[in-house]
Every structure is written in structure tokens, then in C-alpha cells.
Amino acid sequence: MKTKSFKDNKVNVVTLGCSKNLVDSEVLMMQLKENDYDVVHDGGMDDDPNIVIINTCGFIERAKEESINTILEYATVKSEGGIEKLYVTGCLSQRYKDDLEQEIPEVDAYFGTLELPALLEKLNADYKHELLGERILSTPPHYAYLKISEGCNRTCAFCAIPLMRGKHISKPIEELVQEAKNLARNGVKELMLIAQELTYYGLDIYKERRLNELLEALCEVEGIEWIRLHYAYPSKFPRSVFEVMKAQPKICNYLDIPLQHASDTVLQRMRRQITRAETEELINHAREVVPNIAIRTTLLVGFPGETEEEYQELCDFVEKMKFERVGVFPYSHEENTPADQLVDDVPDEVKEARAAGIMEIQQDISLDKNEEKVGQTLKVLFDRYEGGYFVGRTESDSPEVDNEVLVKSEKQFVRIGDFAMIHITSASDYDLYGDVVL
């Protein structure tokens, strides 16, 4: 029994997981808008939607739990008459559709990662091909993610992405350039290139790696001032990318390159196709070609069989390489991956302690690197106002995951979405403080 009257065709799109999911939701929202739906992103019940679409994540155990809890939350809302229709899409739905249909039947329909047309059809909406590359941004209007490919051909033992996203499929350069022009026309100044595996770009459609050519083409787009590279695989990394980064001022001196581990024995069990020595040589080469490059990496601790000695190798590696940015995840077993055949023999409390140990090392490194910036004047893009500070980022920092620059607002002003030159006056572990250079 309904407990309220509904406004027709109002959709709340709830996004969980990574930036690639966010782009999918933005595309979905544009399609719905052009089909005369009223759309909100991550809205609440105060927005009075009659339809909720949850774009789920199924990457690791914590993400799966969050997705399931969110589905259950809205299933309860639906059963109590708070919404009329509930749909689920994304990675969790792709991977566990049959189980979910059995366990949570309150959901009206489940869709996989590549089933946007079917989802729209369910809503009596047409898939509009003429909207290619057009989205409703859920990020602040001055930056956006640009997904250059879908899926992944790598065979990392721990990763379920190929099960959920399929094989690598590159988008043609001309389509990406048009999408970038659309974004720039709407005020976007910073593009963050994302993919499951950035450096594989082009191999499927051009029969050769074409990341360099894509970068060159995007640098020609008027209005785009920063281009940032995310999620590059270290094995067989195309080193000419560093030459392009050095030559093109629009390309941020920044690289997100998940390395996962540094022990050769763990890397071998992970099927990473690279050794510690090769990894160190790659990072050293990057810093030689682009001396002020900021390297962000992601590490995985507690992989099956990880000994204390192997973990110490990883700690030594982090101390030696002194990465600008580091994220750490405890390993979780994923069904139907090669690692699922291994014994998950590292206790959860040990995994958590090892992750915390890496971050303690990185905290000291981050403080040292931040203190080196005191006295420098840096170009900063400002994202928001919060707690009496204008908050922005240098080219060394990506939104939400990296360091920030704070400018006290009492006697200074910067406009959100604009660049400003900031003289750095002090530093903490993960933040810089400074004044506007007039």
C-alpha cells in the first residue's frame, strides 16, 4: 500500500565504487534527462524520487557489503511505500545477478555493466545514440573523469574486474576528443583519464599502443588546462609517455600506477608479470625524465602466503622509493579468481596491522615531502570552501584521494573552480597551507 503520492519520472541515481562507475552513472543520467526524466544523483528521500537506480561496486569484500546494504536499505524503503520502483546495475549486479534476484526479490530488475540500453528500455526510455560522449556531471563543474576504455585483459590473480567488465575495449581517439570538447564547453578545466589499464589503450582497435597520440590530441582541446593519468599497469609500460608528459605543459606531472607489492615471490603469486628490480628501474626512469613527477601507487597486503619477510620487503621498498602518494588495501578473497584457489591464510587482524604499518611509513614520507614545499609558490586549482578555508589541489594531487592546499578565508579570496598561485607557508602530514600571491 502506498503511503504517499509520487511525482512521475523522478529518478535518484545512487553511485557506489570507483570513478569508472561514476562516469557510467553520468551517462545514464544524461540519457534519462533527454527522455524527460527528472534526475538527481546520490539524492535523499527529501528529493521525492519515485524511482531509485543503484549503480553497484563488486570489487572487494567491503565494497560488496556496502552495495548489498544499500540495496537492502532501498528495498525496505520500497516495501514501506517510499518509492515505486527499484533497479540495480553495475559490477555487483553483473557478477551476482542470479543470487541477488533470489536473495533480494524486492528489486524490480537487475542489470549488468554493459546493459544500459536494456535498463532504459525497462524505463520506457530510448537509448539516444546522438548523445555519444555527453553526460551530466556529478563532480564539481571544473573537473571530470574521462574513461578511455572499458574492461581489462590482464590476469592478476586477485582481481575480479575482467569477470565484471569483460575484455579491454578502447574508445576511438576522435570520440574521446569530442567528449573532451563537450566537457570543456561546459566549463571543465581538468580531465582525469581513467581505465582499468591505461597503457593498454589502442592495442585492440589500432593494433598498437596509442596513449601518446590520445594525449597529444587532448592537449589540443581549448579550455582544458590539466590532464591527469590514472591506473597505469607497470609491466611493459610505454616509456614514451614520460617524454610526452615532459613536453606537454597541460599533462600533469602525475602518474597513478598501482604496483600492489614489491616482493618478487608475492608478485609472482599475484601474476603481475614484473619484478621488484624492474619496478624500481621504471620509477627511477620516470623521475629522471620528469624530475618533479608525483607518483601515486596502490599496495595490497595480506595476499595468500604473504610472510613477515615478504611484508618487510614491501616496507623496505616504500621507504626506499619514497612515493608521493600511497594507498593500501588488505587482501580479500574473490570468487572465481586464480587467488581463490589459494588458502587465505593471513588473519584479518594481521592484514589490518600491515596496512597500518605501511601508512605509518608513508605518513613520515609525506610530511618530509610537504615540508620541502614550504616557501615555494604553486599553481592550485580550488575545489571547494570548507571550515573557513578555500581548499584546492596542486598538479600533484587528484581529488578525494590525495593531499590538499588550504587557504584561510579571513583576509583572502579565491573563486571555486579557478586556478591561483599560492605561496606555501606551512605543512602538515597531508596538507599544505598558504597565501594567495597577488
Image (tube, rainbow, N blue to C red):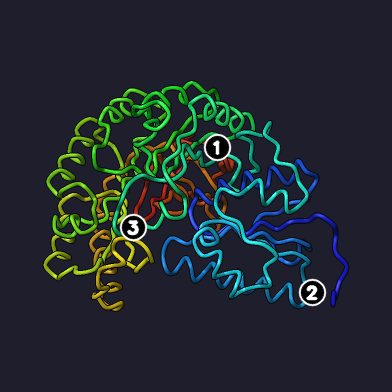
Reply above or below: 123 against 378: below
Measuring 85% from the left and 59% from the top, which residue is drawn there?
7
Q: Amino acid at mark 1?
A: Asp
Question: Disc 1 designates what residue?
Answer: 418
Q: Quadrant of residue 249?
A: top left
Measuring 76% from the left and 46% from the top, which residue is drawn there?
125
Q: Residues within 10 Å of mark 2 (few under 14, many from 20)?
A: some
Horizontal relation, residue 5 to residue 121: left or right:
right
Question: Disc 2 designates what residue?
Answer: 81
Q: Amino acid at mark 2?
A: Gly
Horizontal relation, residue 186 to residue 421: left or right:
right
Q: Amino acid at mark 3?
A: Gly
Measuring 69% from the left and 76% from the top, which residue is drawn there?
76
Q: Quadrant of residue 41?
A: bottom right
Q: Which label is found at residue 327?
A: 3
Measuring 18% from the left and 49% from the top, which residue is drawn there?
321
Instruction: Name the quarter where the N terminus is drawn.
Output: bottom right
Query: Which type of secondary structure does the marked residue at label 3 adopt?
Result: strand
Query: Which type of secondary structure does the marked residue at label 2 adopt?
Result: loop
Q: Position of residue 119 (x, y in %)?
A: 67, 52
- In the rendered image, is residue 345 in sight? yes
